[in-house]
Amino acid sequence: MFEFKPIDLEQHSPWCIRFRGDSLFCSFGATDRFEGEQEGVERYLGWLKQRMETIPNSCVHLWEDEQIIGQIEMKKSYDDPKVGYINLFYLIPEYRGRGLGNLLDEYAANFFKQLGCTAARLSVSQTNLRAMKFYSKQGWQDTGPRDGNPGIHCMEKQYIPYH
């Protein structure tokens, strides 16, 4: 059975660090900018704690029974309150390609719709072909390179909010 639960940083921060590092490795082939510096990890955990306090249920783990198998980190866009932003969509490697990414995408859609968002955005490395293919399959549209970083593409998905 699969279940989303808010991240418990006291118990599960090592998982968060591992997932963030693996997502950076999948996107950029390296994690040294993150894991190579202790302040990078501490800054990330502080950011995550603040995000969870500010927006409940915005950072969650996906569990299968007693095992954490995924993580999502979300927020509202700074420049448009009707748009959500996904900082991290993550499944552990052995669960990828089994259709479980749909659970993450559905959770994010429901979360943003409850906040009144009409769209969501995320950024993805052009070299992370597996992620780009997944997002396209889920209805995300590639809106082009991110300003100042042509190797990173912005993707957007439209929603019909709950009324």
Image (spheres, rainbow, N blue to C red):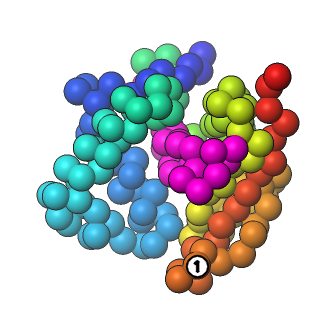
**At 43% from the left edge and 18% from the top edge, which residue is drawn?**
66
Left or right placement of residue 108 versus residue 75 in this view: right
From the viewer's side, name the closer residue of 13 and 73: 73
* Above or below: residue 47 compared with residue 114: below
How packed mark 1 is, by other alpha carbons closer than 10 Å (few <14, some 14-19, many 20 or more), is few
Residue, disc 1: 147
Q: Secondary structure at mark 1?
A: loop
**Quarter of the image where one finds residue 98:** top right
**At 65% from the left edge and 66% from the top edge, which residue is drawn?**
154
- Tell me if residue 124 can be seen: yes
From the viewer's side, name the closer residue of 157 and 22: 157
From the viewer's side, name the closer residue of 127 and 66: 127
Left or right placement of residue 6 versus residue 35 in this view: right
**At 33% from the left edge and 38% from the top edge, which residue is drawn?**
50
* Above or below: residue 143 compared with residue 138: below
Magenta stretch bounds: 67-92
Residue 72 among those drawn in magenta: yes
- Tell me if residue 103 can be seen: no
Q: Position of residue 100 (x, y in %)?
A: 66, 36
> Which residue is most to the left?
38
Split into 4 quadrants, where in the image is the C terminus?
A: top right
Q: Position of residue 3 (x, y in %)?
A: 56, 19
**At 60% from the left edge and 75% from the top edge, which residue is drawn?**
146
Q: Name the residue type under label 1.
A: Asp
Residue 12 among those drawn in magenta: no
